Amino acid sequence: MNITKKLRNNIIFFAMIGLLLFTPVGTFVKVQLIKVYILVSSPSSIEEAEREVLSDFDWKLLDDSGNIVNFQEMEGEIILVNLWATWCPPCVAEMPSLNKLHEDYKDKIKFLFVANDQLDKVNAYLEKNNYHLPVYFQKSNGPKELYSRSIPTTFLIDDRGKIIMKEIGPSDWNSTNVRNQIDVLLAFSLAE
């Protein structure tokens, strides 16, 4: 069979598309491209007049040890909530920045990494990347203000329950802007 140059190029093109869409190689490429985007994408604070206050803190979560935790226990704390999954390339792409932020602020604010995934997959992902993040799984619906149909979605909530930052999609959570906002919240919280 004599393959024309055009047919050969089409086969190569569609093989590359298939490789990118349906294999781990494609996931790796997507994550790397998203990481480039994240370099220029930092969350910004919501204007004071636009900030929503959580109407309810009753949200049952399961920690990675199988214990039920109620979000209500964290009321009055500064909290960062990240909704994510291991199968989500944008979530995986932003996780290094969240991990670094967690390493530096884990004793100062509460972190909730709420996974939309299976425990074994989450544990394997965390171990592979040497992340030590507090991961939770939803057991009940969360506050309506934290509802999102997309992941990743991340919220920074002050000690009064106001959403200070909200980002749908990947972003650099280890940015100067985020760190400055957390530092301001911590200083304000200590002054009270």
Image (cartoon, rainbow, N blue to C red):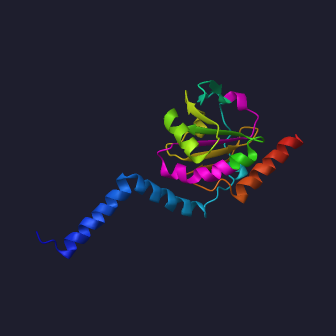
Viewer-side residue, 110 vs 155? 110
Q: Residue at x 64, y 58 (%)?
A: 42
Viewer-side residue, 74 vs 66? 66
**x then y, percent, for residue 175:** 69, 58
Quadrant in the rendering for residue 27: bottom left
State the quadrant of the C terminus: top right
**x then y, percent, for residue 67:** 62, 24
Q: Is residue 19 magenta?
A: no
**x then y, percent, for residue 160:** 75, 38
* Above or below 102: residue 120: above
Q: Residue at x 63, y 56 (%)?
A: 172
Viewer-side residue, 3 vs 43? 3
Whether residue 125 is visible to the viewer of this picture, yes or no, is: yes
**x then y, percent, for residue 141:** 55, 30
Of all residues, the one furthest to the left in this rendering is 1
Is residue 143 found left or right of 180 in the rendered image?
left
Q: Residue at x 76, y 49 (%)?
A: 182
Query: Which residues lie in the magenta part?
Result: 72-100
Whether residue 117 is visible to the viewer of this picture, yes or no, is: no
State the quadrant of the N terminus: bottom left
* Above or below 157: residue 60: above
Of all residues, the one furthest to the bottom in this rendering is 5
Viewer-side residue, 191 vs 122? 122
